[in-house]
Image (cartoon, helix red, strand yellow):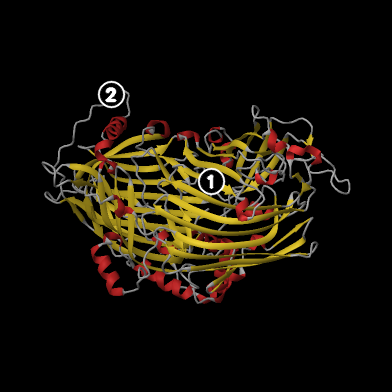
Amino acid sequence: MKPPQKLLILLLCFLLASVTHQAQAQTMYTVTGLITDARTGEPIPFASVALVGRRVGTVTDERGRYTIHAKILSDSIAVSSLGYVTQRQFIDRERTSQAVDIKLVSGGTALQEITVRAGENPAFRVLRQVRKNRFINDRKRLAAYESDNYVKTQVALSHVSDRMRRNPLIKRINEAMSKHDSIIDSEGHRLLPILVSESVSRYYYRDNPSRKREDIRKTRIKGVAVDDAGLSSQLLGGTNLVNQNFYDNYIPILGKDFASPIGDNWKNWYEFYLADTTKIGDHICYEIQFDPKRKEDLVFTGKAWIDTTTFALCQIETHIGSGANLNYVRQLTIEQELEPMIDSSSIGQATVGWLPTTIRLMADLTGVGKQSLGLRAEVALHSSNIVINKPHPLFFYEQPIEPSDTVATANEAYWDQVQQTLAGAESLNKDDLKARQIIDKLRTVPAVKTAEGVGQVLVTGFYKMGGIELGPYPYLFAINTVEGLRTRIGFRTNDQFSRNWIFRGYLAYGTFDRKFKYGGEVNYLFSRQHWTMAGVKMSDDLERLGLTPELIGGNRIFYALSRFGRYRGAYRSQQKELFFRSEPIRGILLTATLGSRTFDPIFPFHYRIHPDMGDLSPLQSTIYDTYWSVEARLARKEKYIMDGNDRITLGTKRAPVFTIRYTRGLRSLGGDFNYDRLTLRAQQSLRIGPFGRMSYLLSGGFTPSTLPAPLLFPHTGNPTPLLTNNTFNRMQFYEFVSDRFVSIHVQHRFEGFLFNRIPGIRKLNWRLVANVDALWGSLSKENQDVETFRPLPGGMKPIHFGSLDGSKPYLEVGYGIENIFKLIRIQAIHRLTYLDGGYNGIPISPFALKASASFNF
């Protein structure tokens, strides 16, 4: 899941259902002028003239004259021509008509000779040299580097239609805003700003081993539904959004992998055209234009400027069009300007790699439907004060995962200095300052305040009341055969209540069983740096065998839905735990637990107290378990951000995550059994080049002890119509139990690899998905003997737990289509083994169609 605040911004935009300011007739601006040679005064024909940052331009005529018409101006124009230095000239954005003459200076540098084979695209030779020299030019060659970074982020609502304007909420906003409260983009659309932020940070990187650190020094954020520091400053204040390296084969954006135009497979994805040779800064560069071979593929269109002597990437401008198999994206643009890094300590001060010093990213997002509200997000980064090849000790990169309390500042003198020294061309302009004024006014509108509160509840699941939050709403009610109507109210505290003490609790009641259930937890956070925490929790509630939160991996929605309908395998559980958790080394999280729990089934279940006595053994249904456990979680390169007193993972960049846990049950602590249990878990997401993405979850467990089935490994079945990943979707609840097992869940998303190549189908943007779920397990004869088949008191037949043949796996395969209407996934599931007979009177169905909904780009 995306971090809550980032989702909240997006969701709020669609809740503001859709603030529209339709594009209105705009005054046309005109810029004319003459381009001449600075030395001779002769006019320069066919020179390129363009508005900087806009997709508007022209070429000079044979007399060196040009005319540009635009709905809105940028703050400067750029002029380039073969053999001349590219020059920029500021223009007046307020004047409707103006004349700007520019004199170009000769480049004065001879170009490197290019040999072109007959019949070969001349751009290919340049691109081969780019790949050949990438080990010299790529920033990864640097042993270490660090820089001061200035980041500016802007988010605004866009593409508001007349239909949206009739929305009551939008009417109230329009009534509160004057006609002057608007900003016009380059295409003439009116924008409604909802966030503007600036930040200053120091970024550190070292290679071998790879380590990163970023200290956010200062930030100021003004926006709707965002705070001034904390999570927002971490999401918007660093290089998280703009750190793409085009020398890599694939560029990760919005959870997708786009093929790089200068990656190893450039020829398979793109058409190229060697357009021109021009001067970028001090470098004479080839200008290469590229377009996708298939517009539905995850690729770019744009231009790259390649240095003619080193074949390094000097500058690149890429766009993602509406034809790409990508949801909710009208347009996405990435621009980078790179500079060579000179190692002054080396002989001759050699170039040792190129770093991007200016990066711009613009995303124009939309909802479902052509008339939906849009979201415009722009991020610009400028790096300065760069130091290379001076790595710090490894412990230095164990950075704080949360900025200091003093990171947020509105000190105008400080930001004026930043804009003069660090921001460069990305400094705040008139539109940015106007956006801040609009946001201040927007936040005073009562309807907007209401929408902020509703969006907070829908995204986080909690309603915030100062230091206490009520929720989560998915657990608010359920209807099942045991409890009837179950209602629940819960709460948690946040960092406004305390930055160290954390309280959570809930109270539930069922109308059928007329019983109260409850749960509570108290934690103390000792250190955010090493995420050290101790706590105690207790609960008395109704659970379902094999579907506790721990077994289903924290899938909140699946756990909430599992409380509806026929409640098979229900038992009452009282649980108490003490735990201590710490991360002494980044990526290694250790947890120690001491606890007890009860198992009191309300379904027909008994087990033999003395299995060696067979049917003569006395029977018992309840279990009292006391235990201690230790767990280690290894997540290399995992990155976190802090949301108050919670820690949110941003993933591990496809490195595997390993978890190993040992549990020891003890009679000496008052429990019914002595036992040992070992569980292991590994999961990872892998990029398979043009074939899409694959993810897997590998788990295993072993206990050599003799125990009743609930203390073994009940495997997670899912007979509901809802498709749920990492479960067995054609297995019944607690159909199989093992004392040793290995399972694997594999899912592969082909993205548009196949459907993008089928005429007609490719327009639907459907995506093929497939899965394989396998389970190898067995149950020892000693544990089988614990189970009884003798009729229970009253003649009721006991529930029977199945077991697997150790030489025969349980196997499911599935295939389906996702991204139907951009939301729906339909999956066909086949159960291939263990098809004979039934399970506790339930017939085996080897095939099912299941559905799920998800939000994916």
728, 450: nearer the viewer: 728
Residue 463: horizontal and vertical position, in percent? 59, 69
773, 436: nearer the viewer: 773
| Contact flag, marks 2 and 1 (Cβ < 8 Å) | no
User: On the rendered structure, is 182 left or right of 56?
Assistant: right
Query: Circle 1 — which element?
Result: strand
Q: Amino acid at mark 2?
A: Arg
Name which residue lies at 28% across and 60% down: 425
Badge 1: residue crowd in 10 Å (few <14, some 14–19, many ≥20): some
Residue 562: horizontal and vertical position, in percent? 69, 52
Instruction: Report the residue marked by disc 2.
Output: 117
111, 669: nearer the viewer: 669
Badge 2: residue crowd in 10 Å (few <14, some 14–19, many ≥20): few
Query: Circle 2 — which element?
Result: loop
Q: Is residue 759 above or below residue 42?
A: above
Q: Amino acid at mark 1?
A: Tyr
Residue at the right extreme, as displayed: 794
Toward which corner of the image does residue 200 lie, by quadrant?
bottom left
Choose the circle earlier in sequence order: 2 or 1. Answer: 2
509, 188: nearer the viewer: 509
State whether residue 160 appears in this view. Answer: no
Name which residue lies at 50% across and 49% down: 631
Query: Which disc, if any, is residue 662?
Result: 1
Name which residue lies at 34% across and 37% down: 262
Residue 334: horizontal and vertical position, in percent? 38, 49
